[in-house]
Amino acid sequence: MMAVGWNGWPFERVAVLFASCAFLLIFIQVTLFHYRQNFRHWSQWVPVIALPILALTGFLFSASNVDWVRTAFIVLCLGDALGGLVGFYLHLKGVGQRVDGYRLQNFLVGPPIILPLMISALSVFALLAVYWSRRL
């Protein structure tokens, strides 16, 4: 007996859907962290605004493989991949600005330096899925 519903969905499409769900979940966590810090720096708004837009574009792309949606998704993923690297730099700098600088305790309680890199890695994963789908 064959499964119904997901037959015919290539891995690339599922990967974009997965990445979009992950962007939405990371958006929630980033919003909580930046809200806790009272959005002290304007750059804290960037992932809070960009991630849900990226997730919604990814959901739209998963539902309908239209050229303009594909292009928008690619551009947003490229922007978020770079934005995650900038976020990593800002978080690393933020850890160093805490009392006693770059000590283990500050890495534990300070800005999470890996979270922005997760955004970059997930964006690259989504870009690979889009690239792979063009090759087929």
Image (tube, helix red, strand yellow):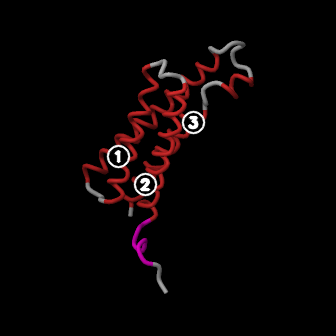
Q: Amino acid at mark 2?
A: Val
Q: Is residue 42 left or right of residue 30?
A: left
Relative vertical location of residue 1 with respect to residue 135 in this rendering, above or below: below
Q: Amino acid at mark 1?
A: Phe
Q: Is residue 45 left or right of residue 36?
A: left
Residue pictured at 57% horizontal, 36% vertical = 115
Whether the residues at callouts 1 and 2 have beta carbons within 8 Å, the answer is yes
**What count of labels does the image hold?**
3
**Image quadrant for the C terminus?**
bottom left
What residue would you read off at disc 1?
73
> Disc 1 or 2, which lies upstream in sequence?
2
Q: Residue 58: x, y in percent?
A: 37, 50
> Disc 3 or 1, which lies upstream in sequence?
1
Q: Give residue 37's mark.
A: none
Q: Amino acid at mark 3?
A: Leu
Region rendered in magenta: 4-10
> Disc 3 or 2, which lies upstream in sequence?
2
Circle 3 packing at 10 Å, graded few (<14), some (14-19), many (20+), is some
| Kind of element beneath mark 2 | helix
Relative vertical location of residue 88 with respect to residue 17 in this rendering, above or below: above
Q: Residue 70: x, y in percent?
A: 31, 51
What residue would you read off at disc 3?
115
Residue pictured at 47% horizontal, 18% vertical = 41
Circle 2 packing at 10 Å, graded few (<14), some (14-19), many (20+), is many
Q: Residue 46: x, y in percent?
A: 41, 29
What residue would you read off at disc 2?
16
Residue pictured at 37% horizontal, 53% vertical = 59
Nearer the observer: mark 3 or 1; the answer is: 3
| Kind of element beneath mark 1 | helix
| Kind of element beneath mark 3 | helix
